[in-house]
Image (tube, rainbow, N blue to C red):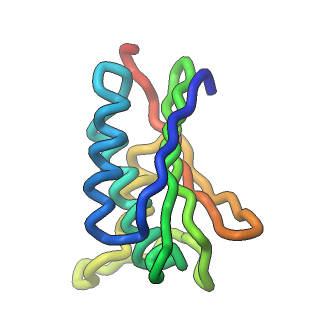
Amino acid sequence: MLSKWCRAFPGLAEEVAHARHFVASLLAERGPVDDAVLVVSELATNAVRHSLSGAAGGWFLVVVGFGDDLVRIEVVDQGGERAPHLCDVTSEQEGGRGLVLIAGCAKDWGVKNWPDGRSVWADLAREGV
């Protein structure tokens, strides 16, 4: 990665909108804004809903890395009992589609485990940049 930007957010549902704004402002004129906003929205929502980041005093970190031909969106959370995974989603089911959406628009994605949490990342192509 040529450059990285990061920002921490309180682990509250309303902070997901601030994370989207942060990513959109960084990618203006520099990359795939719509896909990046979708990715950070899904990952930040998952962090708040499904990890210790959503507990009292919790937080999540958004990292945006720029390479020559891709941008990496990464959300670091405080971990929890359940590992992020693709769900088999039925049409009646509400939710569970976040990682499926990310896998559909990203060149690659994955999960890194840390001693005090984990990060989920997605690489997006920077076409025409």
Q: Residue at x 31, y 45 (%)?
A: 37
Rendered location of residue 107, percent (x, y): 51, 39
Dividing the picture into quadrants, the one containing residue 4 is top right
Quarter in which the N terminus is drawn:
top right
Of 113 and 61, nearer the camera is 61
Q: Nearer the viewer, residue 88 or 68?
A: 68
Q: Position of residue 67 (x, y in %)?
A: 56, 24
Q: Give the image quarter of residue 114.
A: bottom right
Using the image as rendered, state which of residue 85 and residue 61 is in the foreground: 61
Residue 72 shown left or right of residue 10 in the figure? right
In this picture, residue 115 sits left or right of residue 65? right
Q: Is residue 16 above or below residue 51?
A: above
What residue lies at 30% left-to-right and 37% top-to-bottom?
24
Q: Residue at x 76, y 68 (%)?
A: 115
Point 64% across, 64% down: residue: 118
Relative horizontal placement of residue 80, taking residue 34 as reference (left or right): right
Residue pushed farthest front?
A: 57
Determine whether 69 is above or below 43 in the image.
above
Query: In this picture, is 123 found above or below 48?
Result: above
Residue 38 percent coordinates (x, y): 31, 50
The furthest residue to the right: 115
In the picture, which quadrant includes the C terminus? top left
Q: Position of residue 99 (x, y in %)?
A: 44, 62
Residue furthest to the top = 129
Disc tally is 0
